[in-house]
Image (cartoon, rainbow, N blue to C red):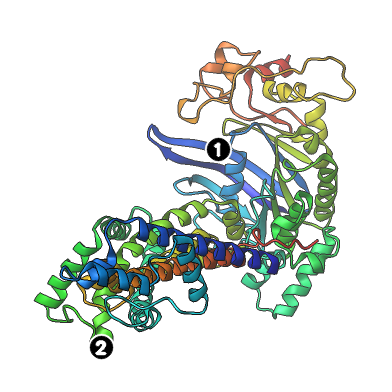
Amino acid sequence: MLNHVLRRFFQAFLVLILVALLIFLMLRVVPGNPIATMMGEHANAAAIERMTSELGLDQPIPVQFFRYILNALRGDFGTSYSMGKPVDRLIRTAFPNTLILALCAALFAWVVGIVCGTISAVRKNSVLDRLFMGFSLLGVSVPVFMAAMILQYVFAYHLHWLDISGVKSWKSFILPAVALGWNSAGSISRLVRSTLLEILQADYIDTARAKGRGQAGVLIFHAMRNAMLPVVTMMALQLSSLLSGAVITESIFAVNGIGRLAVQAIEGRDIPLLQGTALFSTALVILGNLTADLLYGVLDPRIRKEVVR
Amino acid sequence: MRNILEVRHLCAGFPTLKGEAVAVNDVSLTVPEGKIVGLVGESGCGKSMTARAVMGLIRYPGRVISGSILLDGRELVGMPKKEKRALRGSEMSMIFQEPMTSLNPVMKVGRQVEEAIRIHEKVTAEEAARRSVEILTKVGVPEAKKRCLCYPHQLSGGLRQRVMIAMAMILGPRLLIADEPTTALDVTVEAQILQLMRTLSSGGTGILLISHDLGVIAQLCDHVYVMYAGRIVESADVNELFDRPLHPYTRGLLNSVRSLRGGGDVLDTIPGAVPNLTRMPAGCGFSPRCPERCDECVMDVPGLVDMGNGHLVRCRPAEGEEAK
């Protein structure tokens, strides 16, 4: 088991380095000189050149990359061109907002998704089932920006229950979390429903009934845990993508998170900041995958490596 | 001798686009205390549906249409769900065909075995665990204590079926329904499981053994019912049935088993297949495949007639022959 975990960690680390290289190369292949953009159109060629060499951008790319990785390992991701602050500090200030938003969205998605999916499966083809599945279909198919604007219009503009945008209190996170989580809630409830329906046909469900378990007991003790296997995987993946920054949601609701930081970096051709946010997001996604992998092993004994004889 | 199970004129089926398909048609059978009763027939003849009807485990949208099922004198048809649930696992239990898929893959074996105790009795965790180890040892699971901590995928097929049996037996039910308990197992393991069932029945449990394997039936059962296309077509004591099979279908079944004594290189087969439930032939359900079919056979469904020795048969030509 430990071996398995260590190997997974090593693989994850390798993927992270590769992705870093990819991001690094892509940013250097893009045409246009970021220094020229940064210094404005009136800067003269000598000044641009001086600045370029100061930032080490005139070095060969392998050297630049090597230096970047070495610095990154020490926690130094460079200084943002446009904001003049260290990238790691910018990320650190933005991350709590993203974290809260992502956790709220995930909580909303999981609770709503699992509850609705379960009810839909147990009461298949009922009015509730149709209602829930309709809502989840909307969640999966309506784009986030659209959902966000509808929510803003109804709950902020018309009903005045919540603020339109900006972060003032915990209430400010409700609308963005729902907008962001709706999609995930939709896919989770559909997954829970279909998995449960399949599992309720399984032979071991009959066995449980034959022992005298009632509907609720069968569901709680036998069906749910088996149904959770694919669902947990999906939840972990969703959480990591939520954490890595909801670019659109953060922009619409003016939440100063990682996603918004990335947008600012792109607009300003801010290479260190862009590299930093991209790398950070990648790390979170990889971490999510890793968690899903390991959780799967905890939930499903068949995946655990060791075999008791 | 008391009858643990009495099924009277049971009809069960499920709706299809072409109307209700009656999978179990006017089935009556009894399982006495301490006896093993066999229910034989091809796949799709209604054996499992009969068993599920008794357990109350017919899958939606199937249902019991009419008839009566008495468990130790108590009527199960129409009994409130809650009362019936209290009987399942304690008074009657069932062993399923597939030991591979009939155990919950993510639950430890011990917990699954003791689950019935926890549902039906108020006992401490230690007591439940102790009793599950005890029953596992009794059904021949070696190192039962260690196996309790295993997950089903860590056990062999034979062990899993023993676990299934232990699970079904842990509360000492009066009736045990075994639906093809050895079909998925090796022959050597099969023999052990059959021996185990014999031991159980000598303890007073009535066993309804469902099988299509006449070898198993011959070894184990006291009485046999032969089912075809939803109906009982023949019923007799095991020796009587094997010595003097009256229904052409029973004879066909017996001929299609290669006997150790008999010669011949080619196995006999019964031509054709079990009719579709929604397109049943008129008259006797077996008539389209029957070598002894006469004009009367296709007119109406023959009744079950007693041919002496409690040997019942549902066949006009057989009645006629015996009368001669």
Residue B53: percent from the left, percent from the top? Answer: 56, 48
| Horizontal side, residue A300 vs residue B64: left or right | right
Residue A118: percent from the left, percent from the top? Answer: 42, 63
Quarter of the C terminus of chain A within the rendering: bottom right
**Residue A27, quarter of the rendered image:** bottom left
| Horizontal side, residue B37 vs residue A169: left or right | right
Identify the residue at the far front of this view. A46
Quarter of the N terminus of chain A within the rendering: bottom right
Residue B116: percent from the left, percent from the top? Answer: 66, 67
Badge 1 amino acid: Asp
Identify the residue at the far right of this view. B261
Residue B127: percent from the left, percent from the top? Answer: 75, 78
Q: Which residue is mark 2?
A: A169
Badge 2 amino acid: Ser
**Residue B74, quarter of the rendered image:** bottom right
- Say few, some or many: other residues with alpha carbon within 10 Å of mark 2 (under 14 / 14 to 19 / 20 or more): few
At mark 2, the secondary structure is loop
Instruction: Kindly indicate whether the residues beneath marks 1 and 2 are on one polypeptide chain.
Output: no
Circle 1 chain: B
Q: Nearer the viewer, residue B63 or A251?
A: A251
Asked if A223 appears above or below B280 in the picture, the reply is below
| Horizontal side, residue A94 vs residue B309: left or right | left
Asked if A268 appears above or below A309 in the picture, the reply is below
Q: Which residue is mark 1?
A: B26
Question: In whole angstroms, how far apart are the C-alphas of marks 1 and 2?
Answer: 71 Å
Residue B315 at least partly seen: yes
